[in-house]
Amino acid sequence: MRSLTGNAIWNIIGRVVPLAITFFITPFLILHIGASNYGLYMLIMSISGVMGVMSFGLGDATLRYVAHYHIQNDLGGINRVVRSTLFLYITIGLLVIVAVNLLAPILLSLFSIPAESISQAEVLLRISALCFAVTLINGVAVAIIQGVQRYDIQTKNVILAAIFQALATIVVIKSSGGITELIFVVLSTNILSLTINILLAKRILPQTKFTPAYSAAGIREVTGYGFFSFLTHLFGLSFSYSDRLIIGSFVSSSAVGFLTVPQDLALRALSVVGQGGAVLFPKFSSAKGPAEIEKLYINATWVMLMFSILIFAPLTVFMKDFLTLWISNDFAEKCSTVGQLIAFSSMVRGAFIVYQELFKGVNKPQYVTAIAFCVGITSLLLNFTLIPKYGLNGAGYSYCATTIWGFVAMFFTWKYFLKKGPWRILCRIFLMPLAIGCIAILIGFKLQDFYPPISWPILFAEASIFTLGLSIILGCSEVLFGGKDNCATVFSRSLKSAISQSNLLRRNI
């Protein structure tokens, strides 16, 4: 069994490297294709992202059952689930491709796209449907790799795909290519990733049959679990994409670019934390009893929250300066406020990842669905209300408001699911670190008035000092109030164990 911390580290690396690549590619794209074309490109990618609802949550179901059957050495169960999901996904992918090709003009008429760009947008949308179909099938291979907790291997493929896409993007742009060619780059990257993941899955579990097959029992398994995962994904898409689509409809396609740059920066940073927490899913699935689940939940909540605070507190403080140096001062003036609001709201979301993985791991996806429903509907209503009135900033206000449901879910998990009476531990691992993060942000804004960062070295130095000081305060507060087996000490031991296993991990790749 792979180390939980080791898996988390590999998973985080798989997000950090693409994030670093995005840091260099985004200003390069905006400079060469222009903010207007970049906005159209991101609008099409957002529409493609909404197609993800057609996955029906079967990827999560496949991951859950692969982990479950692998721990029982039940190869028949693994093959039944994998082949059934492949059968469903190939069918769904073909239906989506046909539907998008027929309905592309109708779909695009819902958005404020310049008349001269409509025909190009139709081509982009049809290609994005192919990308979606490939991504669906790729999700099955990824589920096999993650289900047996080989995140180290899968991360290698993620990094390779990110590097390939970045290099191909540079070649296309330097060859005077446009956004149509960029979509083909995405398609090529998806095909490459799918091919490698299938080979990796076959290497890890050689007897796995990666061919589609109809199985009534297998379809009942994945759709029974996947139904709630589908609803969760549906409401999650409302949270992730409704603001972009509403801005594309009520404002303009170019305005989507001003939202997506700081939004993607924050969401990709959050995905780094999320990938660290994703390894909890199979860990909760294989937990041996309530005591182990409770201990894992407490330690993981503090660790996930600590990392999200250390990422998003400085990002909130330095967002405008970062965007100014990264893109331009004019660009930063238009979107830094919404970026700060999104970053601030993301600071608490690291803790929310843990209860989501807990509910999925113990086969209670309906709880995640209920929370996602509240968040998705609230986000949709607020975006429709606030964006027409406040523009980009309306999307930021919506992000902040939806965190209330995460707080509700945290208290529900503690009081009614884990059945814990005293609130002292929850206050220590959740409310106290969050309060420290908010105070640090206020202090950071005040200090910026005296020492504004005017260059990359100064920005990096100030952000590093800010983050280091905040991490020391967070760690010391947990050690001081957490007793002998505090979360900071437990995490430190786990980290040392993961590092000591690194040589073994490399030998097994």
Image: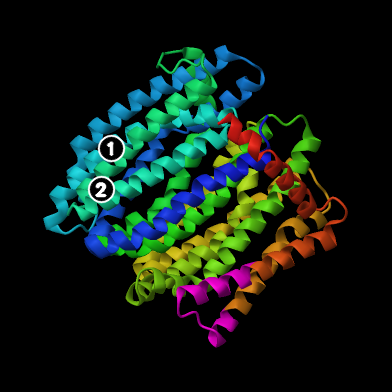
The mark lying in front, picked from 2 and 1, is 2
Q: Are marks 2 and 1 in contact (CB under 8 Å)?
A: no
Whether residue 463 is in magenta: the answer is: yes
Residue designated by label 1: 129
User: Element at badge 1?
Assistant: helix
Q: Nearer the viewer, residue 317 or 420?
A: 317
User: Element at badge 2?
Assistant: helix
Quarter of the figure with the C terminus = top right
Mark 2 vs mark 1, CA separation in Å: 14 Å
74 relative to 266 in the view: left or right? right
Q: Amino acid at mark 1?
A: Ala
Q: Position of residue 39 (x, y in %)?
A: 28, 59
174 relative to 258 in the view: left or right? left
Quarter of the figure with the N terminus = top right
- Image height check: is 137 above or below 131? above
Task: Determine the residue positioned at 56% across, 87% down.
Answer: 450
Whether residue 266 is in magenta: the answer is: no
Q: Residues within 10 Å of mark 1 (few under 14, many from 20)?
A: many
Q: How many marks?
A: 2
Residue designated by label 2: 182
450 relative to 497 in the view: left or right? left
- Image height check: is 441 above or below 233? below
Q: Residues within 10 Å of mark 2 (few under 14, many from 20)?
A: some
Whichever of labels 2 and 1 marks the residue nearer the N terminus, that label is 1
User: Magenta stretch?
Assistant: 445-467
Q: Amino acid at mark 2?
A: Leu
| Occupied quadrant, residue 286 | top right
